[in-house]
Amino acid sequence: MSLVPEQLDLTIVYEPGEDGWILASIPEVAGVHSQGQTREEARANVIDALRLMLSPEPGSSDDQREREALHLTIAA
């Protein structure tokens, strides 16, 4: 029996920023935050930031670590 959930639920938190900007973050993933001039733009930007944060690191020929592909779908 696996203790890892089949679905990963994350939260986007919106906060007012300076000069009317909207700040957006995903607190479950450290370092994922962005901003936008509208809520929709802030949402799109923070989802892009999440994708970037979760992008695979480039490999090198001397990297001996074993890797396993994990496919996540961001349905937002």
Image: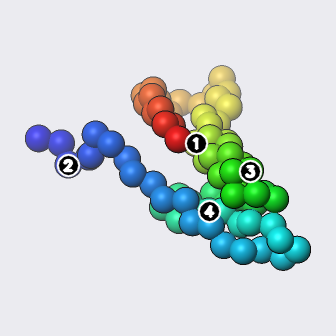
| SS for dot 4 | strand
- The amino acid type of the residue labelled 4 equals Ser
What residue sits right under mark 2 in the picture? 3
Cα separation between marks 2 and 3: 35 Å
Which of the two marks, 2 or 3, is nearer to us in this view? 3
Cα separation between marks 2 and 1: 21 Å
Q: 41 or 57: nearer the eye?
A: 41
Cα separation between marks 1 and 3: 20 Å
Q: Is residue 30 something that shows in the picture? A: no
Residue 21, located in which quarter of the rendered image?
Answer: bottom right
What residue sits right under mark 3 in the picture? 41
Q: Earlier in the sequence, mark 1 or mark 3?
A: 3
Residue shown at the point (20%, 48%) measured from the top left: 3
What residue sits right under mark 1 in the picture? 54
Name the residue at the right extreme: 19
What residue sits right under mark 4 in the picture? 25
| SS for dot 2 | loop
Does 58 appear above or below 45?
A: above
